[in-house]
Image (cartoon, rainbow, N blue to C red):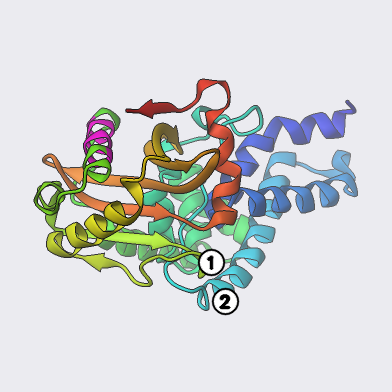
Amino acid sequence: MDSQTALFQQHRQRLFGLAYRMLGTPSDAEDVLHDAWLRWHAQDVDALDDPEAWLVTVTTRIALDRLRRARTERAHYPGPWLPEPLVPDAEHPEATLERGETIAMSFLLLLERLSPEERAAFLLFEVFDYSHAEAAAILGIGEDACRQRVHRAKTRLREGRPRFSADVRARQRMIQRFAEALKNPDLESLRALFAEDAIAISDGGGVVRAVLRPLQGADRLARLYTQIATRFYSRTDVRFTTTLLNGEPVLLAWIDETLVSATWIECEDDRITTTLALRHPAKLARLAMVTKGGAATSLH
């Protein structure tokens, strides 16, 4: 490996973490890094005062351009759009991504509230610990403008944050209860799992059946999941497994070797406050590998 390639690889994980949080899709983040690598390969590295700053700047600006285009596409997306989780492997060891809680599905979805410019400024300052001056230089804007973007981003994110985020073990226990209720559907049992103002968000991408807008209220969610469970999840050929993706427990539903849904939850005081259900087949395709090597735990 030549020195220029070695230097890029040295910063690759940090660059990927930035691009992924910007775009919410591993494949898009990889495309950003590929474009950044091509520009890096054509660059005279010896002429750079700060190679890392150059790489972060180029990666951020490529990701910004992609996010602007993606926002236009997502505006016409059929129903809610959910980020795609990372599949743990040698290239994407989640534990090493800086500030691991900021790759949680709920946080990535929250970032969708921000404009691309606000998102970039917020991530650089809050997650990757660049100063306002450094972030401003990366974005090619004034320092005051950067401060304003970060302030607006914080305000918008504060409004959308859950009241309370239970720890991983609490959510694992709640997911197990949720899976048991789905395998043996009963309206009252499911109703008891949800907080009064619980919300369900489902991404089918217009390819499979899914709720086309967020559904709110314990009664409505209980009826929804009772119908889904009665028609589908109570079938004998459906099995559930759990694993950790993006640092959070997730409930996976399978028919034979085909992954048909991935569901994350937020909970408070033994009640589910949010369900995020990924049902888009193309988005689920990469996740099927989580069963390899015993990464997933079966629920009986």
Q: Which residue lies furthest to the front in this view?
A: 236
Q: Which amino acid does label 2 sit on?
A: Thr
The quarter of the image holding the C terminus is top left
Q: Mark 2 points at which residue?
A: 72
Q: Looking at the picture, how far across and down is residue 107, in whole percent?
A: 38, 51
Picture layout, residue 293 above or below residue 139: above
**In the foreground, 148 or 20:** 20
The stretch of residues the image draws in magenta is 170-179
Q: In which quarter of the image is residue 3?
A: top right
Residue at the location (42% across, 31% down)? 243
Are the residues at dot 1 and dot 2 in contact (C-beta closer than 8 Å)? no
Q: Looking at the picture, how far across and down is residue 103, in whole percent?
A: 45, 43
**In the foreground, 296 or 116:** 296
Residue at the location (27% across, 53% down)? 230
Q: Residue 5 carries which label?
A: none
Residue at the location (70% across, 53% down)? 32
Q: Looking at the picture, how far across and down is residue 9, in whole percent?
A: 74, 32
Q: What residue type is labelled 1?
A: Val
**Marks 1 and 2, the one that precedes in the sequence:** 2
Based on the picture, tell me whether residue 279 belongs to the magenta stretch: no
Q: Looking at the picture, how far across and down is residue 49, in whole percent?
A: 77, 42
The answer to whether residue 167 of the structure is visible from this angle is: yes
Q: Which mark is residue 207?
A: 1
Distance between the alpha carbons at the discs numbered 1 and 2: 19 Å
